[in-house]
Amino acid sequence: MASLNVGTLGEYLREQRRNAQLSLRQLADAAGVSNPYLSQIERGLRKPSAEILQQLARALRISAETLYVQAGILDERDQGDGMEVRTAILADTAINEKQKQVLVQIYESFRKENAAVEEALDEQPAAPREHVAKKAAKKAVAVLKPNASGPAGQGSGGGGGDAAAAG
């Protein structure tokens, strides 16, 4: 395990707090830690436990793993594929916290669907592979539409005629 890199962690926490438009006191209250303790963490004077990092991550609505990596508790390579993308999304200052969470969810759903497609393709003969890939792509889009019983808001004028024709 790497040693704690509290200076970088503190700077990262401060940046995330500011991006979330939270005061030091607001974040401390939301995370269940004292205001002075959080201030010391941000200034690199304290080394928070993994539990405290998890509480801070929950309050900031970011992944705890990202904070573990920043703190040096967890090596980024230990997280496997995709951690770099998640970290980049969560560190981006040009988008807000809600947008970050949506992007991470979309990314995760694509990774899950691609893994499912790969697994299905390994079990299928060559001919129906395209059908499996199309089916998985439709499923991924459905994941992105909450309460989706169909393509809401798409005015085709046909009222779902495509579904009847496809079946």
Image: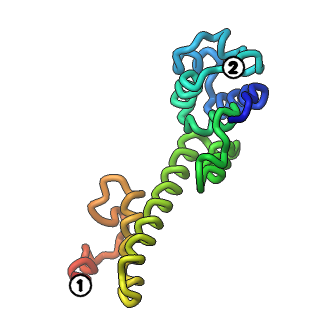
Q: Is residue 31 left or right of residue 67?
A: left
Q: From the viewer's perspective, is 139 left or right of 65?
A: left
Between marks 1 and 2, how big is the CA–CA gap? 62 Å
Q: Earlier in the sequence, mark 1 or mark 2?
A: 2
From the image, tell me which residue sits under label 1. Answer: 165
Residue under label 2: 47
Label 1 Cα neighbours within 10 Å, binned few <14 / some 14-19 / many ≥20: few
Which residue sits at x=33%, y=62%? 152
Who's the residue at 41% across and 76% down the image?
122
Q: Most extreme residue toward the front, as rendered? A: 1
Depth check, front residue: 153 or 141: 141
Q: Position of residue 8 (x, y in %)?
A: 77, 31
Residue nearest the viewer, comparing 159 with 68: 68
- Amino acid bearing label 2: Lys
Q: Nearer the viewer, residue 4 or 110?
A: 4
Instruction: State the mark number for residue 16.
Output: none
Provide the secondary structure element on which disc 1 rests: helix
Question: Callout 2: helix, strand or loop?
Answer: loop
Q: Is residue 49 above or below residue 158?
A: above
State the image coordinates of residue 19 (x, y, percent, origin top left).
Answer: 66, 34
